[in-house]
Image (cartoon, grey):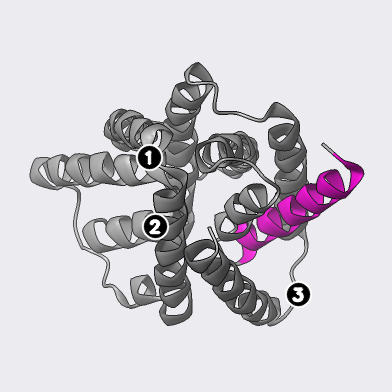
Amino acid sequence: MTILSFLAILGVGIGAGFINVIAGGGSLLTLPILIFFGLPSAVANGTNRIALMAQNIVAIISYRKDGYFDGKFSLLLAIPALIGSIVGAQIAVNIPDDLFNRILSIVMIVVLVIMIWKPHKNLSAASGKDSRLKKIGLAFIFFIIGIYGGFIQAGVGFVIIAALTLVTGLSLVKINSIKVFVVAVYTLSALVVFVVNDQIHWGYGVTLAVGTSIGAFLGSKFAVKHGDKWIQRFLIVAVIAMAIKLFFFT
């Protein structure tokens, strides 16, 4: 790892951690930057999980301190997501680099559209308590979410927010507290798959994890009026450029 790559990955990690707290979608920057610095797609995918683990652990601790953590319900959703993530991570380990890069480029554009359009904000929260049928439905949904998260991760937060908003009557704060726990749990299982298959660059991973943790801390403490709009504008330009590079110049 060169000084240039160290500084670049640390800087992107700080930016991604900040973006994830303020707007979401930080993985749209971290995964491509690892690929651009020469890591095979599977290794970049696995390495990115170290940063995701660090960032979500920080968020879980914060939510617990603020009293927004529902351990029982979060665990109910995390278990099927964990099982699904093992399937998804195994697919990611075995998929050819060029195919993965093209899939990632398409996912990046789709997630970018979701970030701009924000359809999950227009969903109506369900009323009443969760029935057994709702919980079974959520368990299946989170199994599918786990497969996607284990495979590629980017934008999964929007899917989780949309699913919980549509099915439950929980506040956005509680939904986010569930989200970070579920992502942390299935990321751990996916990370194990990547480690077992020797698809981790520990130097890049630790550097990125330090960056995202710093960024998450700064983002949670630093509230700038209309700052999310400027972050979104930056993301639009960066994601489109990276998606074109990944799709046409893999």
Q: Is residue 95 left or right of residue 143?
A: right
* Rendering quarter of residue 163: bottom left
* Element class at badge 3: loop
* Element class at badge 2: helix
Asked whether the residues under the numbered discs 1 and 3 touch, taking CB atoms below 8 Å apart as contact, a structural biologist would say no
Callout 3 amino acid: Val
Q: Which residue is mark 3?
A: 224
* Rendering quarter of residue 122: bottom left
Q: Nearer the viewer, residue 124 or 219?
A: 219
Callout 2 amino acid: Ile
Asked whether the residues under the numbered discs 1 and 2 touch, taking CB atoms below 8 Å apart as contact, a structural biologist would say yes
Q: Which residue is mark 1?
A: 95
Q: Which residue is mark 2?
A: 103
Looking at the image, is 57 positioned above or below residue 32?
above
Magenta segment: 2-22
Q: Is residue 223 left or right of residue 27?
A: right
Q: Is residue 74 left or right of residue 14?
A: left
In this orientation, does residue 175 appear? no
Task: Residue at 53% x, 71% y: name it.
Answer: 244
Q: Nearer the viewer, residue 18 or 43?
A: 43
Mark nearest the camera among 3 and 2 is 2
Q: Residues within 10 Å of mark 2 (few under 14, many from 20)?
A: some
* Rendering quarter of residue 3: top right
- The answer to whether residue 238 is magenta is no
Mark nearest the camera among 1 and 3 is 1
